[in-house]
Amino acid sequence: MKNTDRLFGSLELLILKTLAAGPNHGFGITLHVETVSKGLLHMEEGSLYPALHRLERERLISGEWRQTDNGRRARIYALTAAGRKRLAENEASWSSVSLGIERVLRFA
Amino acid sequence: MTRAIEWLKRLFHRDSAWQEEIESHLAMRADWHRQRGAAPNAARTRAARDFGSPLRALEAVRAVHRAPWLDALAQDARHGLRVIRRSPAFSLAAVATLAVGIGASTAVFSVVDLLLFRSLPYPRAERLVSVGFSGPIDTNEFNVGNAYLDWRDHQRVFAAMTSMYPAGECDLGASPALRVPCVQVESNFLATLGIVPAAGRDFHPLDDRPGAPKVALLSYTMWQSRFGGDPGAVGKTISLDDAPVRVIGFLPRSFEMPQLGEADVLFAEQLDEGVARAPRSTVFLRTFARLKDGVGADTARQQMLPLFQDSVRRYVPPQLQREVGLVVRSLRDRQIHDVKLASWLLFGAVLALVALACANVANLMLARAASRRKELAMRAALGAGRGRLARQMFTESLLLSLAGGTAGCVFAWGLLRAVVAMAPQALPRLPQARIDARVLLFALAVSFAAAIATGLLPAWERLSSAALAGWHSAGDGRSWSRPVLVATQVAISLVLLTGASLLVRSLWKLESESLGFQPRRVVAAAFTLNRHRYNSAAKQDAFYAEVERHLASIPGVSRFALSDTIPPSGGMRGRPFSNMRIAGHPPLPEQGGMVAFRYVTPGYFRTLGIPILAGRDFDEKERSGTATPLILSESLAQRMFPAENPVGQQIDLDVSGHWQPVVGVASDVKNSGLTDAPQPEYYRLRTNRSNELGLSGVALLETPLDAGALERWVRRQMADIDPALPVTIETIEAKVDRLSERPRFLAVLIALFAAFGLLLAAIGLYGVLSFLVAQRTREIGVRIALGATPGQIARMAVRQAAAWTLAGMAAGWAGSAALARLARGALFQVSPFDPLSLAAAALVLATATAIAAWRPARRAARVDPAVSLREE
């Protein structure tokens, strides 16, 4: 997953997609991606937070300090309306890009 | 300030929140590892390994929130600070130079801003004008009841006209009463100015009808001191001049009278139109107006001319008709009419000083360019763009300018305090001058301008020359900018010096100007009686008799006199010259203006040291006699009796049929300031049987003792006679001294700025010459090796300095000549082309530059060819 954030903003896409399932904190997002990808994708945790803050600055997500179920304080992020729209766009473009790459790879 | 702290707090709080977020992530990851069976310690270690460097993450988060331009700026600033720290002597010199320039200009701006730029405290103040007659009686325009009412009724250029009586005084409260400034104003006065009372109501036209119940508006200060600022005080009744007056409101704190007079109480004017409209009206008013939109003051004056001419024809005595004019001018001009030029001169002088300081610093930066060329070439080679390098150099000069500006503000604060302490009355509003936000903004603007001026030229020079390409350091390719800068400095400095020397010479003439009298150790005690308590001639006479009895008997008083007014501060009574008749002579010509007069006791001439030129002084015995002798001033005697002996002639002063003998001729005195020509005047003897002095009087006491001790005696004696009477006590010397306060103030400040300027120019020349000598050491070494004598080498250096200086001086003379016309009004009996002043300024400048050139020239002459040729 080293280059996912550079490749077509895939880190951004993963964050947005994860939050579409419901508000979550940074660690929760990491865990979600690992679990759902069945261990194929492993997020670099250090670069998650700059990405989260960048998304928040762009008002695609909004963060809020809250108590988690096991009693820890964490910053919970939720998707905004703009974030939802961006997710739809990125999903579409990701699909076409990955389809395109797949076709190129298959061609040889 | 608190806003800044709040902002910083949020900034730090934000940072710690980001940190907490990362820590919470690590803790949750550790929990997760623990749940999968790891020991607590191992869980934490693993969590940390999973995460990577938290510091780098935090830095990356910070970078998200930081603007990119801020990053570059911070980098530039860091680099600039490093450069500044690396050459402390250079930086200190630059900052100090800029501090002097910016500080002086900021201090002066804080003073002239109030006079020239800051808007007056009225809504749309630029539409307000002062309207009236100009005439020989008053330095400011005035109006007369009949003319004002005609104008008000028929004018079409003003949205509103309003009037006030010249300032007066009244007694507030019961005994002991407080004497406060009271002004009677028309009911639309505040409305015309656009002022709404802070509490209560404005005057109503009904309040303005003669005989209406007396109502008043009080000043904000009065409201606070008398009523503690209580809005419920509206409607209370106070005692003014022993009559009950209802307070209808209070003025706002920022309220200012349009003529800048004092006013603690405003009354309704209650102008009796019948009285005011009389053809020989004696109702004198100050009148103001608000211009209609789209009408300028000049247009308004043009359109008012027919009304004015009609008034002159109908109301002004024929012998004075030629001497009156119509004035319509902005309120600002009315307020600063006699200091406008002085303000602009001061402001111009400090701006010149700022220019000098900038030229100096630019020069310093250029000198340093040589030593930094390698660094810049390196940076350019490493890929820094030309724009980036220019920006970096600009950041450096900006840092220096801001440091200079900060130091300058401190300097300005000190300078302003010194200036105000030196002469609080020299300019109107001077004591109100403060270093406030607006002034600080000016300092900031000047700092930025200085940064541009000092940073741009070197940046352009360094980046445009082959500097960026070359590593070699020999030869500078003879840059033009440095000599031009030096010549500019010399030129500006010469203009400043010329101005200063003209002003000093004018001041010297002014101070040595004869007043026509020579008071020594004379104390004047001036007072004005309350017209309600001294409402009869008998009461006034009794008072004056008491004054004479008490004061003349003070031990240590060698001479004593009583008069209604004294020179040199004006305020005298006057009559038309043409009203006088001489027994046995044809009538005097119609024109001739006003003749001033005063009532004096016989000691007057001796106390003030006014010589009697012919005939004799008044005699004490005459005061109880029936004769009414006159003494004429020299110029009046000349005019009335050009070919005869005035002594012994009989004069009728105002067509009354009462003939009075001329017993003497006194030397002329200056009655209204040092610069005015002596007015013709006559003296009447104050006898023992009338209230000729009126309500105002001045007692003159000469003493061989200490004036301060006498002042206490006089105060005590006056308090014995009337404890409630305010008395102003002052030595005549102090009074005379005050007359030249403003020219002295101007001359001292401009001379100070010229001295700063000269110093900067000399330092600039010294720096450039030293630099060039250092740079040409090799060349000089070769020349010496080839047989040049030290004398020739020194001459070579000096010739260069002389060429720049002469070029600068030529430009400076041209500049002085161009500015001469403007300065003429500030000079007294000195032509702006006064050869002595011009020569003195040039001599001072030449001396200073010679001193500045001396050391570098000597250093050049002492170059050792063996050493210099081995150097590289």
Image: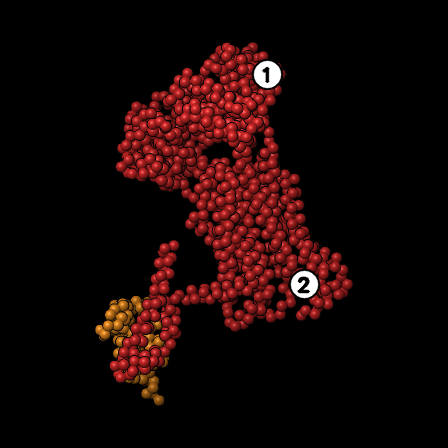
Chain colours: A orange, B red
Q: Which residue is mark 2?
A: B776
Q: Identify residue type, mark 1.
A: Arg
Neighbour tally class for label 2: few under 14, some 14-19, many 20 plus, Cα within 10 Å: some
Image quarter (top left, top right, bottom left or bottom right) of the N terminus of chain B: bottom left
Image quarter (top left, top right, bottom left or bottom right) of the C terminus of chain B: bottom right
Residue placed most toward the observer, B150 or B471: B471
Left or right position of B854 against B747: right
Task: Kindly indicate the quadrant of the structure image that contains residue A82.
Answer: bottom left
Is residue B693 shown above or below B177?
A: above
Tell me residue B483's x, y (percent).
62, 56
Tell me residue B270's x, y (percent).
33, 26
Tell me residue B495's x, y (percent).
59, 46
Left or right position of B115 against B641: left
Q: Residue at x 51, y 11 (%)?
A: B625
Neighbour tally class for label 1: few under 14, some 14-19, many 20 plus, Cα within 10 Å: some
Chain ID of residue with mark 2? B
Of marks 1 and 2, the one in the foreground: 1
Q: Secondary structure at mark 2?
A: loop
Disc ID at residue B84: none
> In this view of the protein, can residue B117 be seen by the observer?
no
* Residue that protrudes farthest toward the right in the picture: B787
Q: Identify residue type, mark 2.
A: Arg
Q: Residue at x 58, y 12 (%)?
A: B648
Q: Residue at x 57, y 12 (%)?
A: B649
In primary-sequence order, the first of circles 1 and 2 is 1
Task: Kindly indicate the quadrant of the structure image that contains residue B239.
Answer: top left
Disc 1 vs disc 2: Cβ atoms closer than 8 Å? no
Task: Kindly indicate the quadrant of the structure image that contains residue B252.
Answer: top left
Is residue B278 shown above or below B31?
A: above
Residues under labels 1 and 2: Cα distance? Answer: 82 Å
Q: Which residue is mark 1?
A: B616
